[in-house]
Amino acid sequence: MLLEEKLVSSSTTSHQANVQIESPQEQLRMESQQRDEKALQFLLSQEGGTQSALSLSNLQTVQEHFQQEEKAMCPAAFKKEQKEKAEKVEGEALLSLQDEANVVSDSAPRQLDLKEEQTGELTKQSELLQEMLDDTPKKLMNMTSSTEGKVDKGLLRNLFISHFRTPKSKRCEVLRVIGRILDIEKGEMEHLLKEDYGGVTTWMPGWLGGGPKSVPSTPLIPSQQSVWKSSFSEHFVKFLEMESHPAVPPPKLSARAMEL
């Protein structure tokens, strides 16, 4: 019994001793394992740093290359942008010109019709003015004839009667007055008065439309003188009546012609 107890105690002591011996070994093994892990981590960290440095270097190289390309592309991009802006402005200007051209083309027929209408109106006005200009000389002549043809019928009748009632020695004065009224030149009148007053003077037939004629100087017998005086008086009165009637007045212009 005692022996068994000693064996059990010895076995327990041996086990404990083994345990105590194995415990430092286990610790040593664990420490060695931890050391190996840390060494591996260190190696991995070194490799990671190298890789990071390499990646950073590559990134810097790529960035520098990109910056160089960007610098090279800036002038080209600027030129491209300016070109696009110029093309845009030119396109807008062309559109504006096209719109204006469309407006002009749309209004051109109306303007042409208006111009043709104005041209026709101006042509009519020109023709009317030309007619007025063509008629002006005739109207002036008619007005002149009308003015010159107006004779004071009463005055000439009195002069005519006075001529026969005036003594023969004074009849030349009456004829001079009549000559002045008829615008006979003084020299011509004096020449006519120098003709033979015993017969008909040469200026009387001129009034009656026969033109100047030479009259025979043979004295007329009393009966012939009476017939001649009666015939002459009738013709002279007719002449005065004809001269006393005014000429036909010139036609009046229309209201439209007066407006023009």
Image (cartoon, grey):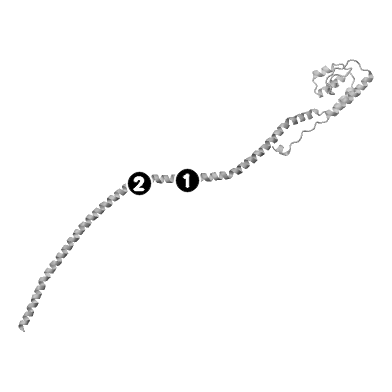
Q: Tell me where residue 197 sits by quadrant.
A: top right
Q: 192 or 166, which lies in front? A: 192
Q: Is residue 192 above or below residue 48?
A: above
| Image quarter hosting the N terminus | bottom left
Question: In screen coordinates, is 53 left or right of 166?
Answer: left
Position of residue 239 in the picture relative to residue 49 (left or right): right
Q: CA distance from mark 1 to mark 2?
A: 26 Å
What residue does disc 2 label? 73
The residue identified by callout 1 is: 91
**Residue 244 on image: x %, y %:** 83, 29
* x 94%, y 19%: residue: 222
- Mark with earlier residue (1, 2): 2
Name the secondary structure under disc 1: helix
Residue extending farthest top: 218
Question: Residue 15 got which mark?
Answer: none
Give neighbour class at mark 1: few <14, some 14-19, many 20+ (Cα, 10 Å). few
Q: Are marks 1 and 2 in contact (CB under 8 Å)?
A: no
* SS type, badge 2: helix
168 relative to 113, above or below:
above
Q: Position of residue 196 (x, y in %)?
A: 87, 16
In this rendering, does residue 58 appear at all? yes
| Residue at 18% over, 61% down | 40
Would residue 152 be seen by someone viewing this image from the given angle?
no
Pick the residue in front: 54 or 260: 54
Q: Is residue 180 above or below residue 8?
A: above
Residue nearest the viewer, comparing 215 with 62: 62
